[in-house]
Image (cartoon, rainbow, N blue to C red):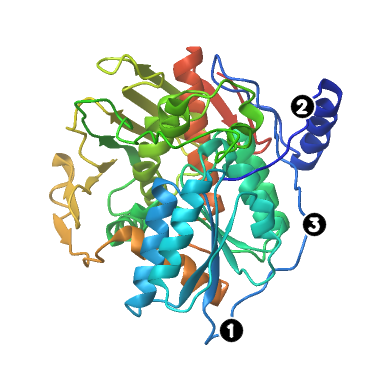
């Protein structure tokens, strides 16, 4: 992640928000209790709009990475490895991070692994976006920076891959949606890789065929366990020195100013102002492909609960349970835990039959009263290997073909409604509704 100056004085900030709200054109939907209010949006393009470029057939896709920490570093290695293996033709030519140590380490690794490729390192992401020779940008900054980075990258004419969740709050997600509508020529992908698993395409086909009857309700989960507390595995480096080799204020952005806290900087997913925790970091992986399979429209009513059962030091919850209802009446039950690893079976329950999705394959089994009409069926699905690599390759292929990416803005917007309303429900103690026509959330 990198530097972005935001007005600090009351008058300039009010002016900034007024302009950005006009641009975003979406209503304020609020935030969880205890966090700063985030209007629609603290989002305003800060770079001059430029026309993007598409790489030629025999040309490498030249990429920049904003945010070179855990996920950013993982993507860097993955894209270079896939290119070296002949699976794609891409080059990492620029990296950016507010921490000079991280940026320099990423630059060094990228140059060592890419023979003859010169890699530049930046502290300001604006400097990276100004480069006309960069086709695409991968965003792996903390959640509260995603929206600004996405919109600025689109304005700079870049194709974009962003880590999940798409944004921290729904108002920011809707602002991103409008920006993508404005820049409809750009390719946009959200890093929810399970969408690439063939079983979800097969399940979608089964649902659309009418074989299971009307999908009544579905269930899924993402559960894991820890002895030391979730996300505490992100280490703290004693060499970090704010004001010297790390721009703490730039990292905070609109959530600053605050006193330097290396735990917040390294483990921000544990803190409710900076992350939705289990919901945005884990549950998006399982919600996204199931929402795709069902094609039930927008979430329209969400109620959720969260608790601190084991990890009482973590500000975000270590146990969450969501109930999400969609436009067509379908209800999805979602469980998440970082204190117990046994989750729910992933399945879609229809009036006539049920679809089981826990394995790589699709199992269709009739309801008891329809066994004479519907036969049990197992639909074999191919093993695609690493689904995250498959999603990365999908993005690169779409950059060349200019076809929409698999985990696109329409799907990501629906997921963000569920994420944001569930988060608010937990912290505020209310059910929330969403009106797809007005694109507005309210207490139910």
Earlier in the chain: of badge 2 and badge 3, it is 2
**What's the residue at 13%, 40% (across, down)?**
368
In this orientation, does residue 140 appear? no
Q: Is residue 219 left or right of residue 190?
A: left
**What's the residue at 60%, 41% (across, down)?**
173
Q: Is residue 309 above or below residue 54?
A: above
User: Where residue 282 appears, x then y in whole percent?
Assistant: 35, 38
Q: In the rendered image, which residue does mark 1 sit on? A: 56
Real-space Cα separation, disc 3 to disc 1, in angstroms: 24 Å
Label 2, secondary structure: give it.
loop
Quadrant occupied by the N terminus: top right
Earlier in the chain: of badge 3 and badge 1, it is 3
* Rendering quarter of residue 56: bottom right
Q: Is residue 272 above or below residue 375?
A: above
Real-space Cα separation, disc 2 to disc 1, in angstroms: 43 Å
Real-space Cα separation, disc 2 to disc 3, in angstroms: 22 Å
Label 3, secondary structure: give it.
loop
Q: Is residue 184 above or below residue 299?
A: below
């Amino acid at each position: 992640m990198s530097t972005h100056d935001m007005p600090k004085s009351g008058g300039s900030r009010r002016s900034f928000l007024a302009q950005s709200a006009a641009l975003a054109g979406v209503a304020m939907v609020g935030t969880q209790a205890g966090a700063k209010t985030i209007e629609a949006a603290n989002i305003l393009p800060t770079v001059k709009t430029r026309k993007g470029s598409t790489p030629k057939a025999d040309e490498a896709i030249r990429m920049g990475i904003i945010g070179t920490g855990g996920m950013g570093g993982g993507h860097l290695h993955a894209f270079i490895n896939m290119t070296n293996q002949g699976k794609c033709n891409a080059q990492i030519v620029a990296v950016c991070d507010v921490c000079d140590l991280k940026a320099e380490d990423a630059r060094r690794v990228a140059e060592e692994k890419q023979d003859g490729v010169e890699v530049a390192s930046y502290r300001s992401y604006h400097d990276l976006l100004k480069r006309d020779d960069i086709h695409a940008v991968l965003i792996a900054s903390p959640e509260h920076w995603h929206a600004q980075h996405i919109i600025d990258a689109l304005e700079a004419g870049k194709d974009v891959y962003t880590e999940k969740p798409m944004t921290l709050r729904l108002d920011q997600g809707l602002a991103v949606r409008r920006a993508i509508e404005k820049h409809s020529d750009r390719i946009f992908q959200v890093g929810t890789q399970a969408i690439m698993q063939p079983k979800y395409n097969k399940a979608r086909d089964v649902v659309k065929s009418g074989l299971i009857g009307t999908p009544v309700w579905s269930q899924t989960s993402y559960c894991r366990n820890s002895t030391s507390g979730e996300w505490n595995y992100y280490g703290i480096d004693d060499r970090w020195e704010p004001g010297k080799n790390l721009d703490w204020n730039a990292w905070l952005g609109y959530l600053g100013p605050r006193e330097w806290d290396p735990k917040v900087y390294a483990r921000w997913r544990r803190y409710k102002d900076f992350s939705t925790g289990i919901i945005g970091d884990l549950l998006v992986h399982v919600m996204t492909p199931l929402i795709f399979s069902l094609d039930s429209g927008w979430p329209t009513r969400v109620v959720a609960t969260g608790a601190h059962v084991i990890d009482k030091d973590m500000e975000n919850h270590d146990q969450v349970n969501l109930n999400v209802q969609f436009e067509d009446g379908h209800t999805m039950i979602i469980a998440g835990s970082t204190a117990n690893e046994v989750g729910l079976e992933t399945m879609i329950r229809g009036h006539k039959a049920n679809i089981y999705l826990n394995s790589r394959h699709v199992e269709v089994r009739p309801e008891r009263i329809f066994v004479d009409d519907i036969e049990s069926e197992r639909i074999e699905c191919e093993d695609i290997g690493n689904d995250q690599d498959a999603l990365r390759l999908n993005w690169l292929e779409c950059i060349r073909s200019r076809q929409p990416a698999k985990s696109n803005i329409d799907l990501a917007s629906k997921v963000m409604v569920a994420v944001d309303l569930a988060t608010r429900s937990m912290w505020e103690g209310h059910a929330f509704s969403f009106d797809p026509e007005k694109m507005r959330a309210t207490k139910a």
